[in-house]
Amino acid sequence: MLIQLGKIVVTGVAFLIALGCISTDALAGTIVGSKHDLAYLEDLHGIGNSYNDEVCIYCHTPHNADQSQGPLWNRPAPTVSYTLYASETLIELPGQPGPASLLCLSCHDGTIAVDTIIEMPNVNVIIDKNHPKMRYDPTNPGIMDCGTCHYPGAPGGNHVRSYFGTNLSNQHPVGIVYNTSTPRLRQPPAETVKLVNGKVECTSCHNVHDPEIEPFLITDNAGSALCFACHAK
Ligand code: HEC
Ligand code: HEC
Ligand code: HEC
Ligand code: HEC
Ligand code: HEC
């Protein structure tokens, strides 16, 4: 097995050793070693310590952050316009994703590479021209996207469900006002979920730092409990 990512080529054996290096058991419930630990993901792929194993740096920086986007935010904002969810039975029509959702989409819409950040740490900065983006584009098989290896049936596993693209029409609506006068929705929603400026956003259902309830859910969805937190059905 030969794994090539960016300029680094490693053998399958070295790759599996890299896999064994990380144990997530000791830090269950933390972002460390989770799919939101990009330093871990880079180790896993044999890329090395591009940002010196700094877990937080891919999203936050202590200095010179873009505070207009989010807390000490360290990523460029998406500049695209999204295709929105639409349906005849909706009470409210969704708008473009709100600021909280754009934080997520800065990786999950596949337009911005996961390791593109605003403020580089002072140590060990490697700027690789082959920044991997979270997208699956069979028409561009040459480019170093996550989907180049993580497509259905691929040896790296199929991850394309996490690569949303800019068409959100088949995703639960975000940027949508939580109507406070309809019996279709619980008034107010259960405390287990949160609204952002009165709207449903990605962070209404997800907790970006905590992988404990997969996949990064804010509350357990057994018996559709997450859905019932808002929907009176
Ligand atoms: C994959 C991106 C990502 C990474 C990595 C990340 N965060 Fe966050 N963080 C976010 C997002 C998104 C928010 C805003 C969450 C919200 O609005 O609910 C946030 C909010 C916060 C907040 C304020 C709200 C809160 O939950 O307390 C703190 C503090 C924070 N992060 C600390 C950290 C630290 C420390 C690290 C590294 C150990 C880290 N984050 C790593 C995405 C990330
Ligand atoms: C710095 C880039 C980055 C940001 C910002 C980010 N993610 Fe992710 N996210 C990832 C990566 C990388 C993965 C792993 C994808 C894969 O498996 O191919 C992932 C995976 C996930 C998963 C699937 C986890 C699993 O166990 O399969 C969820 C859910 C998720 N992210 C939600 C969010 C939400 C919600 C936000 C915003 C609050 C967010 N992400 C922000 C990079 C990011
Ligand atoms: C050059 C091919 C290649 C590229 C590009 C690549 N991966 Fe991987 N990835 C692999 C292989 C191979 C594995 C190991 C699969 C195994 O043995 O379980 C792996 C494992 C993973 C795993 C852990 C195993 C799993 O299925 O949960 C995650 C998460 C992951 N990759 C996410 C990503 C993300 C996110 C990107 C883009 C930033 C990416 N990969 C780019 C080849 C690749
Ligand atoms: C209304 C609640 C809700 C909202 C809003 C929401 N998600 Fe999710 N998300 C879920 C649930 C529940 C799952 C688990 C689905 C499953 O396992 O069947 C999930 C799964 C995921 C996954 C894993 C891939 C998959 O399809 O299973 C990713 C990535 C993800 N969400 C990212 C996001 C992002 C980014 C946003 C904002 C654009 C968002 N989510 C908004 C509830 C939500
Ligand atoms: C944080 C609150 C919240 C959570 C949690 C939530 N929803 Fe929603 N959902 C809404 C809102 C608000 C709307 C738009 C209002 C409407 O028209 O019903 C909506 C819309 C929908 C729609 C589209 C309705 C239509 O008329 O087209 C469906 C279907 C739906 N949600 C299913 C789910 C499922 C399944 C879950 C659990 C995975 C879930 N929701 C979790 C708030 C939520």
Image (spheres, helix red, strand yellow):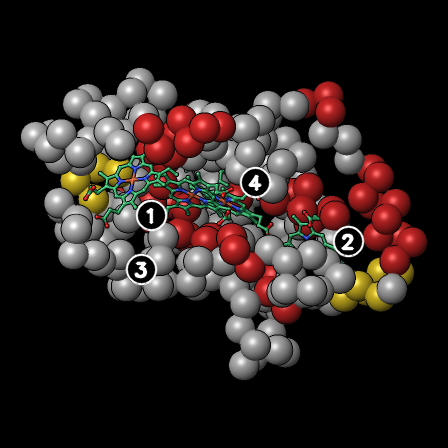
Q: Which mark is residue 169?
A: 3
Q: CA distance from mark 4 to mark 3?
A: 25 Å
Q: Is residue 209 visible?
A: no
Considering depth in this image, is 228 or 153 the residue closer to the camera? 228
Name which residue type carries label 4. His
Residue 2 horizontal/vertical position (percent): 84, 66
Residue 136 horizontal/vertical position (percent): 54, 67
Callout 2 touching callout 3 (CB < 8 Å): no
Left or right: where 50 falls relative to 11: left
Left or right: where 107 falls relative to 46: left
Residue placed furthest toward the left? 181
Name which residue type carries label 1. His
Judging by the rendered image, the residue that carries numbered circle 1 is: 172
Considering depth in this image, is 231 or 24 the residue closer to the camera? 231
- The quadrant of the picture showing ligand 4 is top left
Q: Is residue 11 visible?
A: yes
Q: Nearer the viewer, mark 4 or mark 3?
A: 3
Quadrant of the rendered structure where residue 64 is?
Answer: top left
Q: Which mark is residue 36?
A: 4
Q: CA distance from mark 4 to mark 1?
A: 21 Å
Q: Nearer the viewer, mark 4 or mark 1?
A: 1
Q: Residue at x 19, y 22 (%)?
A: 188
Name which residue type carries label 3. Ser
> Is the residue indicated by label 1 positioned so its CB lies within 8 Å of ligand 4?
yes
Judging by the rendered image, the residue that carries numbered circle 2 is: 46
Q: CA distance from mark 2 to mark 4?
A: 17 Å
